[in-house]
């Protein structure tokens, strides 16, 4: 069994076509070619934190993967990063462990941001006038960075609760070539952006239908990955022309879709899985005037695909 540290993992990342690898994982999942049990989860109260255990395999593949990722939201008070974790790679033929990817939560962040880019590729309007980012944390940065090359727009409006964090975000993202404005009023994002990415652990809706002032908007909601979180008002999904889940079974119990179903704002049979759109079995956006929503709760196939690709690249790199 090999142990790989974060610096080794980061070194090989440029060798991997992440969009292709993770897109293939979504297709396999929606085609019934994977085994992905329900998410394992530990929710901590004092201090506040979450531990997610996601695991599974793609049938007739070489490996199965168990991923452990945590988020402890007061760690900044201790001078520690919020995220931690690792990915464990085992032989699918023998069950023997072959690698520990001690990625410190980095690969989870990357595969989450790549999923957002995939959603934007198939669902965002052809002409994105302004990108709206809700939140100022790691995903608020990485989701925007991974849109480079996918979306031809650098005009960004970001919302956050802290003026200091907004200023820091603005400075960092402008160094990456974006033109960033900030706001403390989240309704400004819904009112002026036609590609919106929500990245917070909110438990009360931030994006509300009454705030929209234009047609032709796509929302990628990726913060609500537990049953108690919600970033987008149920009525927004009810008004959408297309609601997309990364995993329909997962979204029945967590994320924006679960809240919209509980509010009777949408029906389960109207939800489309992302993998079927990537595979060309269902259309994505079909007109510039549509309102579309992608609910990304994070699926184990993303972890499987990125772990396999990283492990193979590490073997080549030795």
Image (cartoon, grey):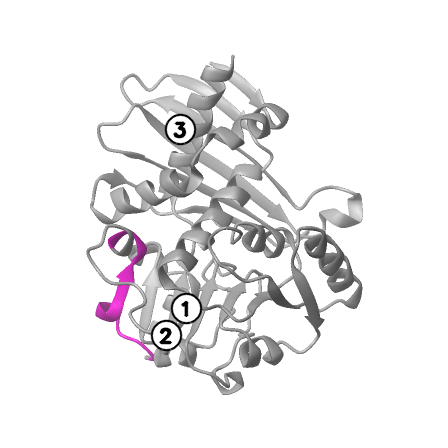
**Of pointers 1 and 2, the one earlier in the residue sequence:** 1
Identify the residue shown where x is 43% and y is 50%: 115
* Alpha-carbon span between mark 3 and mark 2: 37 Å
Magenta residues, as a range? 265-276
Nearer the observer: mark 3 or 2; the answer is 2
**Of pointers 3 and 2, the one earlier in the residue sequence:** 2
Label 1 close to label 2 by CB (< 8 Å) = yes
Secondary structure found at label 1 = loop
**Residue 120 visible:** yes
* Alpha-carbon span between mark 1 and mark 3: 32 Å
Q: Is residue 54 left or right of residue 83?
A: left
Identify the residue shown where x is 32% and y is 79%: 264
Is 267 contained in the magenta span? Answer: yes
- The crowd level at tag 3 (other Cα within 10 Å; few <14, some 14-19, many 20+) is some
Residue 33, image x and y in percent? Answer: 21, 40
Is 274 contained in the magenta span? Answer: yes
Secondary structure found at label 3 = helix
> Could you say which quadrant of the image residue 186 lies in?
bottom right
Q: Which residue is mark 2?
A: 288
Q: Which residue is mark 1?
A: 125
Return the residue nearer the eye: 140 or 93.
140
Nearer the observer: mark 1 or 3; the answer is 1
Residue 185, image x and y in percent? Answer: 67, 78
Q: Which residue is mark 3?
A: 308
């Amino acid at each position: 069994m090999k142990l790989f540290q974060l610096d080794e993992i980061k070194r090989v990342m440029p060798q991997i076509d992440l969009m292709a690898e993770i897109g293939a994982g979504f297709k396999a999942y929606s085609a019934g070619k994977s085994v992905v049990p329900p998410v394992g989860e530990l929710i901590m109260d004092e201090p506040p934190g979450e531990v997610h255990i996601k695991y599974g395999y793609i049938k007739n593949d070489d490996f199965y993967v168990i991923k452990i990722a945590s988020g402890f939201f007061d760690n900044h008070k201790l001078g520690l990063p919020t995220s931690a974790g690792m990915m464990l790679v085992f032989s699918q033929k023998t069950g023997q462990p072959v690698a520990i990817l001690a990625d410190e939560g980095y690969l989870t962040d990357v595969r989450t941001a790549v999923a957002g880019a995939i959603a934007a590729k198939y669902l965002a309007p052809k002409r994105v006038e302004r990108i709206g980012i809700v939140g100022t944390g790691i995903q608020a940065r990485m989701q925007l960075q991974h849109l480079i090359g996918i979306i031809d727009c650098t005009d960004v409006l970001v919302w956050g609760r802290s003026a200091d964090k907004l200023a820091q975000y603005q400075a960092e993202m402008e160094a990456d070539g974006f033109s960033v404005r900030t706001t403390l009023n989240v309704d400004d994002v819904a009112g002026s952006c036609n590609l919106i990415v929500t990245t917070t652990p909110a438990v009360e809706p931030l994006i509300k239908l009454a705030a929209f002032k234009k047609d032709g908007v796509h929302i990628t909601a990726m913060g609500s990955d537990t049953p108690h979180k919600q970033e987008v008002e149920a009525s927004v999904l009810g008004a959408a022309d297309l609601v997309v889940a990364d995993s329909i079974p997962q979204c029945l119990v967590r994320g924006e879709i679960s809240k919209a179903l509980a509010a009777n704002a949408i029906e389960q049979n109207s939800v489309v899985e992302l993998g079927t759109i990537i595979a060309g079995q269902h259309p994505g956006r079909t007109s510039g005037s549509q309102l579309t929503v992608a609910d990304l709760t994070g699926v184990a196939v993303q972890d499987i695909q990125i772990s396999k690709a990283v492990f193979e690249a590490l073997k080549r790199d030795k």
